[in-house]
Every structure is written in C-alpha cells, then in structure tokens.
Amino acid sequence: MQQTRSRNLLLWLILTGARSALAADDSDERIHIQGAPLVGGTNGMNFDEDNLLTVAQVYGRTISKLNVDSGEIVEQLSYGEPGDLVVFPDDLIFGSDGTMYYTDPAYYETVLARSPGGPSVPLLPIGSVPFVNSVTLSEDGKRLFYGQCWDTEDGNGLFELSLETLESKTILEDIFGCASNAMTYKDGALYTPRPFEGRVVKVDLTSDPPRVTNVTTDMVSPNAVKFNSLGELAVTDTATGEVVLVDLAAPDTGTNRKVLAQFPSNYIDNLAFDMDDRLFVSSASNAAVTEILSDGGLRIVSPEGMSIPMGLAVVEETQTIYTLHPGALFQIDPKKSEF
C-alpha cells in the first residue's frame, strides 16, 4: 500500500509541475524533482516598455513577465482568468503604446491583442489562421506581420495586417513546413527563419512581388531571429543548439556566422535583446530562460526543470524514472533527485 501511495503522489507531483508537496507526519513521501517555475516551456519572448522580459509558455497556457536581474515572475496572464484569452501562446511583441500582440496556433488560431490592463481581443476571426506562429511589427507600429509554421500538409503563408484599417493581405503562400518562425522586421523587410530549409531569408516588402533572398544558409534548423540596437542579427539553431551572430555584409551566406553560445541540441527556442542589448534565450523543452554574457558565459535567469510531463514510466530494476515532455525525454534518478 505504501509503495502504491508513493507512486501516486509522485505522478501527481510531476503532472502539476511539482510546485508543492503535501506534508504528512506518518509518511516518507517527498518531492523527487522540482518543476520549472515557467511551466509549459519557454517560447516566444520580448521585452516590454519597462524592460521586463515577457515569455509565452505555449504548453503552459500562460504568459509571464520576468525581472531578468532577479528572475522574479512579476506578472502572469493565464487561461484561468476571464478576459486573458491565453490558451496556446506562441510568439509575442509589444507596440509603442504597450499593447501586446500574440499568436495562438492551436486553440484560438488567430492573432490577439491586449492593451495594458486588458482584456485580450482577437484581431482576426477565431479559427481563421491555423498554425499561426510568428508575429512582429513594422518600426512605426502600424503594420503587423504574422506567419504560419509547422503545417506540413496544406502549406504555410506569410501575411500583413494593417492596424489602422484591420485589412489583411497575403505576402507569401504555399510554403512547405514553415513560412515564418519568430521573425523580425527592419528597414522595409522581414527577416525570418525557415527551419525546414536550413536558412534565414529576407523578404523585401518594398518590391512587388516581395523579393526573397538568403541571409544565412547551411544551418540545420534555424528557429528565431532578432536584431540588437546596433543592427546585428542573432539567430538560434534549435537542432545544433547554437546561438549565432550573422555578418550581413559577408558575401558567403554559408559561412557568415559567429557562434555566441552553445547549448544542448533541441534545447533552445527563441531569443530577445533587452534595452541594453543583453541577450536572452528560451527553451521550449526545458522551460528555462538564460542570459548569454558578453564573454560567452551563461547566466540562468529562470531555471530549467520539468514543465509539462505527459507520461511516466518506472524501471523497477534500476529504480529509474522516465517522463516524456514535448521535445524532451527526462531520465530521473530518485536517489539523487536530479535528471
């Protein structure tokens, strides 16, 4: 009976992110592994006007604001609060007036806007943009761009929405795998990763039709791009775990990258620069937020951990526990309380 109760408690702790434990005087039950503070993985992120890092937790049905110096979560929006409309948040960006724009690719299937204080409202009909993934704004804040990703059957599109007239138009369509994942806008062009093609492209919106050219090539799975205030472009490659800086002036797009930091394969997701050009990366698999220091070192802002376990297995012979997450399989040693 005691063994069964222990296993049941362990399963409950894992499925709830292991945020708290029930104390019992007549039991040796305990937390084996502490869950990540940012439950559900860390995905798209950007800094708001107060230089707080705002992180979309796509599987956690939450958007969190962090103080990156202390790691403190200072505000959260979640599916449980009326008016938040946060169910599957993937990418986000802020307008100059503080309005947050974010995508929901799998539940609302649209782009939503939330002015300071809320509530959230869909900018496009609910269900009209399945697989909508990335979102960004023009420099004047009047044009919003959004792209589909991961639809491997019907093709993906890249779109523009006028925030003045709320009229939308198609920029590109029928792109296999991913039209845009975590893109950014600069000087009349969109810079967007194509993870299925191993390259980052520039979409020149000043030409008709829009002209697509290579920015950097011969990557494995580029996933996100952001410019700093100096106009330098940083890119994450999820498959290799590299965060790189691209030399936009170099003639050879296959070798125009410098590695800024190395993470484990399939660990990193998105990235963001703060007002002082400090660089931070997210982790969809491990739910962490990490700062990349100027000397290449790493500083943990919000620690990794189990974030959305979807299965549990125990190997009796070795007393090893396995838990499956989206994008990760964790092996846990209960004796050491580590994975």
Image (spheres, rainbow, N blue to C red):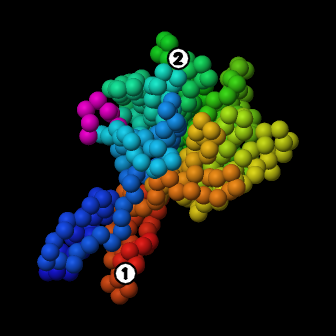
Relative height, residue 161 to residue 57 (above, below): above
Q: Earlier in the sequence, mark 2 or mark 1?
A: 2
**Residue 224 appearing in the image:** no
In terms of secondary structure, where does tag 2 sit? Answer: strand
Q: Nearer the viewer, residue 82 or 98?
A: 98
Q: Residue at x 68, y 51 (%)?
A: 294
- Amino acid type assigned to the residue bearing label 1 in the image: Lys
278 and 309: which is toward the camera: 278
Please tell me how crowded label 2 is: few (under 14), some (14-19), or many (20+) other residues with Cα within 10 Å: some
Tell me, for residue 162, which label it has, or none.
Answer: 2
Residue at 42%, 48% (x, y): give it: 72
* Vertical side of 323 occupied by 316: above or below: below
Q: Where is the N terminus found, in terms of image quarters?
A: bottom left
User: In the image, which residues are magenta?
Assistant: 80-87
Q: Is residue 125 above or below residue 220?
A: above
Residue 257 in the image, given as x and y percentages of width and height: 76, 49
Q: Residue at x 30, y 59 (%)?
A: 19
Residue 16, magenta (yes or no): no
Q: 298 or 186, which lies in front? A: 298
In percent of width and height, residue 322 lies at 39, 72
- Contact check, label 2 and label 1, Cβ < 8 Å: no
Label 1 environment density (alpha carbons within 10 Å; few <14, some 14–19, many ≥20): few
Residue extending farthest top: 165
Q: Is residue 251 visible?
A: yes
Provide the secondary structure element on which disc 1 rests: loop
Q: Indicate the amino acid at tag 2.
A: Ser
For discs 2 and 1, the disc positioned in front in the rendered view: 1
Residue under label 1, please give it: 335
Main secondary structure found in the magenta portion: loop
Which residue is at a point 50% across and 46% down the rendered structure image? 68
Residue at the far right in the pictured view: 251
Q: Quadrant of residue 331?
A: bottom left
